[in-house]
Each structure stands twice: as C-alpha cells, then as structure tokens.
Image (spheres, rainbow, N blue to C red):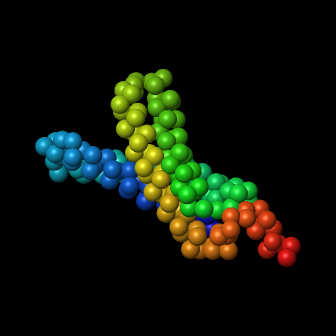
Amino acid sequence: MAVALGFLLIPVGAFIGTAIVFVSILLLDPASVTVKSTYLLWYFGLLFGAIFAAPVTAIILPLAYAVIRRTSGLSATKISAVGLLSGILPVWAFVALERQGTFDPTERGVLLMSAVGALSGLVVGMAFAMMMKRWRPTHWSTSGAGRDNYNEGITG
C-alpha cells in the first residue's frame, strides 16, 4: 500500500516543485513571463520534477514508513521530516553528477534547487503521512509505543 501511494504521489511532488518555481519567477521577474515561457516551464518542470520526486515518493517515504513503524512509532512529523530531508538528496545527486560535465551551477542555484526539493519533499511527506494514517489507522498509535504496539497485534 505504501509503495502504491508513493507512486501516486510522484506527479504531486512534480507539480508542487514546478508551482514553487513558477511563483518564484512571477514574484522576482514578472516581465520575463510569457505564454511560451509558461508552457515550457510547466512542461519541463513537471517532467524533471517527476524525475526528482520519484525516488523520494516511491522509495524513501515507503521505506521510512516501514522502518519508523517498527522502531519508534509513527507520527506525521517524522514522515514529513524524512520527506523534507530526502527532497534535497536528488538535487544534490544531480549537482554532484553534473559538475563533472558541462553543467556548473552557482551556489545560489544549488541553494534554490535544494529549497524547492526540500519544500516539495515536506509537502509530499505530509501528504503521504496523512493518507497512510487514513488508510492504515491501526499502524498509528497515539501512545507512540512503536515496536510493542506492532507486536501486540501479532502475539496478543
């Protein structure tokens, strides 16, 4: 269930990241926005946003859900924090791999791309946590019992 939800959240992460970039451009330089640039931004933003969101939503969040569920007790804050931190990882991996080629981003560019990844990861992590809490409420204990609460259903 968690992996399926992760795959469903890939376009959501792409949309959030693209929307953040689009709003930033509108606020910083509204004169540069044309119809053609808007179409290109949304087309390539959603395409590359999906590439950056896929490892976070389809791999990292479901794995974190499984690990946190079995060790320390689930909370939306923990899952959201994982989303926030893991949203930065694909950006840094891209920058590290591309620095060997022709792409040499500035420090400001890396910081801005990291901020977009972090915000997108935070929102997608929050959405993932809320949806999993809705679909699997028995996994979420209010006492934070973690492993004991998980094993209680098996042995008791």
Q: Position of residue 50 (x, y in %)?
A: 44, 51
Residue at 50 percent of width and 29 percent of height: 96
Name the quadrant of the C terminus: bottom right
Residue at figure coordinates x 73%, y 62% from the top left: 146
Q: Is residue 64 left or right of residue 114?
A: right
Q: Which residue shows up at 48% across the image and 51% down it? A: 121
In front of the other: 87 or 41: 87
Q: Quadrant of the N terminus?
A: bottom right
- Identity of the residue furthest to the bottom in this view: 156
- Which residue is situated farthest in the left direction here? 31
Q: Is residue 2 visible?
A: yes
Residue at point 53%, 45% (across, down): 85
Residue 109: x and y in percent read: 36, 33
Which residue of the protein is positioned furthest toward the front in this rendering? Answer: 143
For the residue pair 81 and 31, the one nearer the viewer reads as: 81
- The number of numbered badges drawn on the structure is 0
Give left or right: position of 69 versus 124.
right
Q: Position of residue 122 (x, y in %)?
A: 47, 53
On the image, the x and y values in percent for residue 147 come to 77, 62
Determine if residue 48 is in view.
Answer: no
Question: Quarter-wise, where is residue 131 in the image?
Answer: bottom right
Q: Is residue 150 above or below residue 114?
A: below
